[in-house]
Amino acid sequence: MKLIGSRTESLIRERLKIFEKIILENNVIYNLLINNFSEITHVYCLSQVIEQAEDIYTLLVNGKSIIEFELSRVDDSIREVKIESLDVYSKKINDKSSKLTLAIAVDLCAK
């Protein structure tokens, strides 16, 4: 997807930057990332689904990998961790909004 510098892109870009800081300040998520990726240069939240007992995260890590997991709201435990390559993940997403968010996150990682 080609980025054109629209207002929507700007808003998504700012949201991704803000959430990167929040994610890295969460010790539970940070430890999960360090255990699975030895070095973290960038991490962007592609989606966060808030449910009653847990939050489901999809993160782009270092511009190369996608990690999906559930974070319990009850005890901060992490379950159902799935890691896949950016290429595999990008072929699975179909909606325009998700594709745009991914394209912007990849662009941020390249800078």
Image (spheres, rainbow, N blue to C red):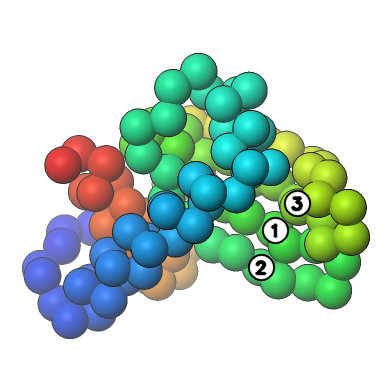
Mark 1 falls on what kind of element? strand
**Distance of label 1 from label 3 (alpha carbons):** 4 Å
Is 19 on the left-hand or right-hand side of 31?
left
Q: Which mark is residue 49?
A: 2
Q: Which mark is residue 70?
A: 3
Check disc 1: other Cα within 10 Å, few if <14, some if 14-19, many if 20+. Answer: some
Q: Is residue 38 above or below residue 17?
A: above
- Pointer 3: residues within 10 angstroms few (<14), some, or many (20+)? many
* 23 to the left or right of 35: left
Seen in the picture, residue 74 relative to 63 is either above or below; the reply is: below
From the top left corner, tell me how far across and down residue 28 is, in percent. 69, 42
Q: Secondary structure at mark 3?
A: strand
Q: Where residue 23 sits in the image (x, y, percent)?
A: 52, 51
Quadrant assignment for the N terminus:
bottom left
**Residue 99 visible at all:** no
- Sooner in the amino-acid sequence: mark 1 or mark 2: 2
Name the foreground residue: 14 vs 107: 14
Would you name the residue on which mark 1 appears? Answer: 56
Task: Judge by depth and name the residue closer to the eye, 21 or 104.
Answer: 21
Q: Quadrant of the C terminus?
A: top left
- For the residues labelled 2 and 3, the Cα–Cα distance comes to 9 Å
What's the residue type where badge 3 is placed? Answer: Glu
Between 49 and 96, the one lying in front of the other is 49
| Mark 1 touches mark 2? (CB < 8 Å) | yes
As drawn, 110 above or below 93: above
Q: In the figure, residue 6 lies in which quadrant? A: bottom left
**Residue 4 location, x and y as percent?**
10, 68
Q: Are marks 1 and 3 in contact (CB under 8 Å)?
A: yes
Q: Residue at x 89, y 60 (%)?
A: 74
